[in-house]
Amino acid sequence: MADQVNVHFSSSGKSFTAVAINTASKAGEWIKSKLGAYTTLDVKTSHHDLVTEIDRGSETMIKNLILTHFPDHSFLGEEGVVPGPMASAKALADVQDAEYLWIVDPIDGTTNYVHSYPFYSVSIALAYKGEVIVGVVYDPSRDELFVAEKGKGAYLHGKKMHISPDATLSQSLLATGFPTDQAIALPTNMRGLQAVAPKVRNVRNGGSAALHLAYVAAGRLSGYWEINLNSWDLAAGSLLVEESGGQITDTRNHPYNLAVRNIVATNGYIHQELVDVLDQADATGL
Ligand code: 2AM
Ligand code: CA
């Protein structure tokens, strides 16, 4: 755990959060301006797993901007890593002990982006000795900028965010995501969906993990679970949830850390209930 006393939010007078906000805004505006205009669509692990030149261009822009300000910092971005869960885990393991590590998803929700479905985001986190201290998620479609700093709360355009007050699953709107891995992860999540859906008001699958976490933080969703995610999908959103008073763990209720891939994020009140339902349905993926 980072020592609260020693956590700094700036270097040489430059604010980490200001750089994260400016960078996410700039990249977000750029990807929005290119919506419907990508020219290269490549598949990664399968036809469910896509990447465009806009993902790569956004990551290059973000990396250049951040490293211009903080050349000594480390950088982990989705498009700089070979696709697949093993390579992703190794890429994280290689850098997660870095003092300052930026963790970036240049477009979270690429499938939506490719289909011009306006639910995608730019996700930028800064971890200090393995713990996220700044998280920014920007939704260019709605011009919504979600920002959290460790110990300082979570904000949407300067207004403090709060989790939803829903006390039970039966009062809750939840979200999940359908994993790209068809062999194990998708059937696992279908078991979870089958078990959760009758117990809640309804379930959404928006298609952007980072935005789902931002929506839990903003009280728009009471909970969200998904399996088989990567550190860049979760890092920024994890701090948004924690700093708005919510709870984020793995699907077996162990504390979140950067290596967690199977996630439950809630307002806290329904956390145990959701974890129990997933466990009973053999849907934790663990
Ligand atoms: P992405 O758009 O950056 O790829 C949707 O359910 C969520 O799953 C999105 O956040 C999406 O992020 C992520 N996702 C899509 N393909 C994935 C893959 N192969 N491995 C892990 N996460 C993936
Ligand atoms: Ca992405």
Image (tube, rainbow, N blue to C red):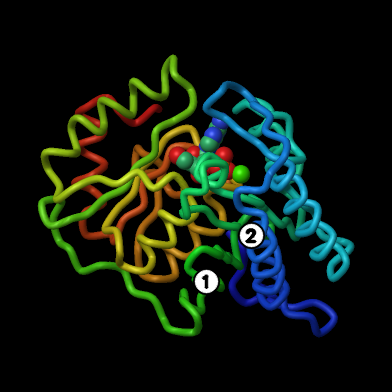
Q: Residue at x 76, y 59 (%)?
A: 62
Instruction: Note whether 69 is above or below 231 in the view shown.
Output: below
Residue 45: percent from left, percent from top: 61, 23
Mark 2: amino acid = Ile
Residue contact at pointers 2 and 1, CB within 8 angstroms: no
User: Ligand 2 falls in which quarter?
Assistant: top right
State the mark number for residue 124.
2
Asked if residue 200 can be seen in this view, the reply is yes
Which class describes the residues within 10 Å of circle 1: few (<14), some (14-19), or many (20+)?
few
Closer to us: 71 or 182 = 182
Question: Residue placed farthest to the top in the image?
Answer: 183
Label located before the other in sequence (2 or 1): 2
Please name the residue that numbered disc 1 is placed on. 143
Q: Nearer the viewer, mark 2 or mark 1?
A: 1
Q: Quadrant of the C terminus?
A: top left
Instruction: Note whether 264 is above or below 172 in the view shown.
Output: above
